[in-house]
Amino acid sequence: MSTVFIAFQTNEDTRPIVESILADNPGSVLDEQPAMVKINAEGSLVIKRESIEERIGRDFDLQELQINLITISGHLDEDDDTFTLSWKN
Amino acid sequence: MDMKANKKKLGLKEKYAHMTRGLDWETTYQPKEKVFPQATFEGIKVHDWDKWEDPFRLTMDAYWKYQAEKERKLYAVLDAFAQNNGHLGLTDARYLSAVKLFLTGISPLEYVAHRGFAAAGRNFPGVGPRVACLMQSIDEVRHAQTQIHALSNYNKFYEGFHAGATHQIERVWYLSVPKSFFDDAFSAGPFEWMIAIGFSFEYVLTNLLFVPFMSGAAYNGDMATVTFGFSAQSDEARHMTLGLECIKFMLEQDPDNLPIVQKWIDKWAWRGIRVLSLVATMMDYMLPKRVMSWKEAWEIYFEQNGGALFNDLAKYGIKVPECITQCTVDKEHISHQIWLTLCTHGHAMALHTWLPNADEMDWLSAKYPNTFDKYYRPRFEKLQELADKGERFYANTLPMLCQVCQIPMLFTEPDDPTKICYRESEYQGEKYHTCSDGCKHIFDDEPEKYIQAWLPVHQVYMGNCWPEGTDPTVEGFNPLAKYLEWCHIEDGKDNCDYEGSSDQANFAAWRGVATQNV
Amino acid sequence: MAVKALYDYQFPALDTQDKFHGNQLLYVGWDDHFLFAAPLAFTVSPNAKFSELVGQTLTFAYGRHPDWAKIDFSKVVWLKSGKPFQPEMNKTLAEQGIKHKDALRLQTPGLNGNGTNF
């Protein structure tokens, strides 16, 4: 299994997003760096629209992630409800 | 009239289909191959362009919306930075050498990337990549602009920011390294461009450039750079995805594409790694407060992340580029070798250099236990000894350059870090020298291309690098002074050691003013 | 292999000898002396004697290193294109086949910056 990751700017917009990801992906690991927060996971990582909406109390469009996104690793598949990164090997 | 929309909004996938495929058309009064003349000459076979899908499924309307939001955030911060003397929050003004290197070496490439992706988008017959290339092209010009805007705040106070983004890229010797990389890519066909920039640079290497650089900027109090960096980086994730999608697409379309793609991966991985040796130096030497060593960054972002990528591509028959073996050796050497070179050529640079102090050398020893004390510490100590005697060493003769990467021939043999690596080829009766097996291989594969390389050292010797009207035969002619003038490098202000520079003096004075009632 | 292009891809080499005003390019590296981070590039007259190359051109470039003055040129090893080469001090570069863009490597056994290779 290879590691996938996603990194965001550290700010108030991303705090609930990061919380959601950590809650939805048991085993994912948080790596905090200057001004940047990175989440590593083995094989795959799923970001769920619903989980973020629960935390922020409003509708959320997963494309809003792009505003604070820094980098990703893995193949991406995005639809209305989920944003998934994975290595398929 | 009140129109009630009962129908649910289009889903992401539907919207993407409508806003990309739905916008394409068939040619009628000209054959398709005349409209897209660059689509086939590289040998890449494509059977079904509709198989190309942008995983972000970004459409133009959403693109404008989110990009506008990024711009608003960026310029709000830049205003705050300017209004609050943000430059005085830096750890140390010598940090700005890293920013100068970025502005002179990288920002102009953003502009070339803008042109290159516009051209690639124009030349692909498929509508999926065309839309994605269009967005990336607009992103890239935005990056060039925002970088110049952000750094213009430093130009009000510090030396060396006045000519970088436009003038110096075509003149300054070490800037020919990144420039030639992009020229090489742009003068290839659209598919090779996508591997060179979209895949190798954006996917495999960009993490090594932007992530540590921006974290480093944050660590060193550089709010301007962090902000443009992150604003740009939010686009990079999309660019990386495009690069990866492109490579998968080529490999899935036809098995005959594999050897062509493999050749390009091998070439552009090595070209990119050579350019990034400047970034290695920045991370290990130019940040007053360090984030991580180049070796650590290399291990995380190249060995682990790149390893995962190549494991994944193995199913198509793609092999890890051969040059990676050499990189595993090089990761413990290149930053030191390059910084020693820059320090001994600091009189001919558009930024300040300095010798690492005792604390910094201890940090380097800890990060590079196998190499720093053994090979490099004694060299820095010797240079310091000379500097203490008032004889800071600057080379008086131009270095030999690699014909391909254009870096001085400073790299060492894979099996002996005390021996310079010399490689030589002959083409049409003329000799050509390269710094490594990687660069030699690239030369030998396309000699017709690299024999045209604009090597700054040779150009100086031809007499092409002085201001118009210069007469090199006059008594007391000083070629270096004339070269600096031609580059718009102000001798004594922009170059030489940070110790004793006006940047150092001004920063100390302004900081003093900022904290006292004087 | 050749460049793949849409047309016959032929361009002249940029750095041919005729561009150097009667001189030629010559590269010289001095092994084990990384004070000079890379081998150096010189323009020299093909009619210069090898002794002039050493005594003037190379001494200007390398002479600031304390090892330079200690070199016994009767005991050094020269390489040209990586192969041993025996220069003749009284002959010109042209006379002994040192051509445009040749790379010479000077090895001075025993002299290596006091063990630092610097």
Image (cartoon, coloured by chain):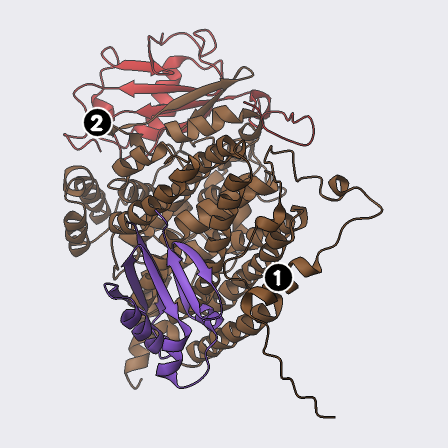
* For residue B374, above or below residue A76: above
Residue C27, image x, y percentages:
41, 24
Q: The residue under label 2 is which amino acid type? A: Asp
Q: State the mark number for residue B17.
A: 1
Q: The residue under label 1 is which amino acid type? A: Ala
Residue B340, image x, y percentages:
29, 42
* For residue B1, above or below residue A34: below
* For residue C4, above or below residue B160: above
Q: Which residue is mark 2?
A: C67
Q: Is residue B51 left or right of residue B298?
A: right
The purple one among the chains is A
- How crowded is the residue under tag 2: few (<14 C-alpha within 10 Å), some, or many (20+)? some
**What is chain C's hue in the picture?**
red
Residue at the spot 49% in from the left edge and 70% down from the top edge: A80
Q: Is residue B223 left or right of residue B328?
A: right
Q: Is residue B266 left or right of residue A10?
A: right
- How crowded is the residue under tag 1: few (<14 C-alpha within 10 Å), some, or many (20+)? some
The brown one among the chains is B
Chain under numbered label 1: B
Q: Secondary structure at mark 2?
A: loop
**Residue B440, can we see it?**
yes
Chain under numbered label 2: C
Q: Judge if badges 2 and 1 mark residues of a common chain.
A: no
Position of the C terminus of chain B by quadrant? bottom left
Quadrant in the picture for residue B342 = top left
